[in-house]
Image (cartoon, rainbow, N blue to C red):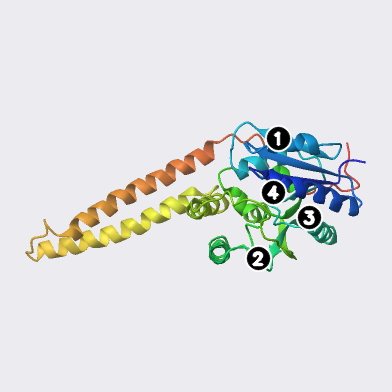
């Protein structure tokens, strides 16, 4: 029997937490009575994580070590590419996710064949007030911008089917938006309430920069999921709006000039010219982007599409 569940744990300088978390995860998977593997991705740790994993590794525990710290998305991408389970579980290494909840996530996937991803929703979060508050703002903004329903997009505890895991392209900070990317690819996503613990040892490795990086990646995700195949809708739309405002200002300046007013020093004239010039550039950029999309290689008409099932009538044949 092949591996049923792969638990992927990205870790950066979480040695004390891993010493407790890995055995707990193994115990939880043994109780779930499934074939499993625990894959720890050491993201260039310098605290002895590699030595610890040499002691913990065995038939069901593996470690993948990156030469340098590359970020959580890169670590997850490396882990997903090497996970062999039918179901892939993602879990943070800080000890805040409870391995005992993995069974609930897997049960949700088994109960609904159309479900591709289940996120563990931290109903009661054991984090600082500022972190809880900013997380609420982030979740509401993400839902509003992308149109995907959810209240805990950035939860580290997730379970997904293998076909979704192999289709994800994670880089930068896109690990925060796995539910968005999953729904964009046509998968059904859901959330299940899970228990959340306080961090056991050490401090969070994500500083204040995660807020503005997350905002920039939200723009990236919105662009990727909405305008990848139609970039002119974005750039052309912005160009048309700017051009309309700029033309309005220049029209106003023309009327004033015909009435005898001096307009050479008016800010509205400069603003109108600037907006029209930028509008031409935006429209040109949109057309070039459309040309790039049109000319990109297409080996098949269905290339890039996630085809779930292909059937034929019983009478078809040579």
Name the residue at the bottom extreme: 124
Query: Is 221 left, or right, of 286 in this rendering?
Result: right
Report, in whole angstroms, how far the alpha carbon at label 4 lies from the one at label 2. Answer: 16 Å
Mark 2: few/some/many CA within 10 Å (<14, 14-19, 20+): some
First in sequence: mark 3 vs mark 1: 1
Query: Is 156 left, or right, of 279 in this rendering?
Result: right
Residue 114 is situated, as x and y percent measured from the top left of the image, at 78, 58
Name the residue at the top extreme: 67
Report, in whole angstroms, how far the alpha carbon at label 3 lies from the one at label 1. Answer: 22 Å
Mark 4 or mark 1, whichever is nearer to me: 1
Mark 3 or mark 1, whichever is nearer to me: 1
Q: Are marks 4 and 3 in contact (CB under 8 Å)?
A: no
Give the position of the C terminus as an image quadrant. top right
Residue 80 is situated, as x and y percent measured from the top left of the image, at 72, 41
In the picture of the structure, the residue carrying the numbered disc 2 is 125
First in sequence: mark 2 vs mark 1: 1
Q: Is residue 162 visible?
A: no
In the picture of the structure, the residue carrying the numbered disc 3 is 99
Report, in whole angstroms, how far the alpha carbon at label 4 lies from the one at label 1. Answer: 14 Å
Report, in whole angstroms, how far the alpha carbon at label 2 lies from the one at label 3. Answer: 16 Å
Residue 55 is situated, as x and y percent measured from the top left of the image, at 79, 36
């Amino acid at each position: 029997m092949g591996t049923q569940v792969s638990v992927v744990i990205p870790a950066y300088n979480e040695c004390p937490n891993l010493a407790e978390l890995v055995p707990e995860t193994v115990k939880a998977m043994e109780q779930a009575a499934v074939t499993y593997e625990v894959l720890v991705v050491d993201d260039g740790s310098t605290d002895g994580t590699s030595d610890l994993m040499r002691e913990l590794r065995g038939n069901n525990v593996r470690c993948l070590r990156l030469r340098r710290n590359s970020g959580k998305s890169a670590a997850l991408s490396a882990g997903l590419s090497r996970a062999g389970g039918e179901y892939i579980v993602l879990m943070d290494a800080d000890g805040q996710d409870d391995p005992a909840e993995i069974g609930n996530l897997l049960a949700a996937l088994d109960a609904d064949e159309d479900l591709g991803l289940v996120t563990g929703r931290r109903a009661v979060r054991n984090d600082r007030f500022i972190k809880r508050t900013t997380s609420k703002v982030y979740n509401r903004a993400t839902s509003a911008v992308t149109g995907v329903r959810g209240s805990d997009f950035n939860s580290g505890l997730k379970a997904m089917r293998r076909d979704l895991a192999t289709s994800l392209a994670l880089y930068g900070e896109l690990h925060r938006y796995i539910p968005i990317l999953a729904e964009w690819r046509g998968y059904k996503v859901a959330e299940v309430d899970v228990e959340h613990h306080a961090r056991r040892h050490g401090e969070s490795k994500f500083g204040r920069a995660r807020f503005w990086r997350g905002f920039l990646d939200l723009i990236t995700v919105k662009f990727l999921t909405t305008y990848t195949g139609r970039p002119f809708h974005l750039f052309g739309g912005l160009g048309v709006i700017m051009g309309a405002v700029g033309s309005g200002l220049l029209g106003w300046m023309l009327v004033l000039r015909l009435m005898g007013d001096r307009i050479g020093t008016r800010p509205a004239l400069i603003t109108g010219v600037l907006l029209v010039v930028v509008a031409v550039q935006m429209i040109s950029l949109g057309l070039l982007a459309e040309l790039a999309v049109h000319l990109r290689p297409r080996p098949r008409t269905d290339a890039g599409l996630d085809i779930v099932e292909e059937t034929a009538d019983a009478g078809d044949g040579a």
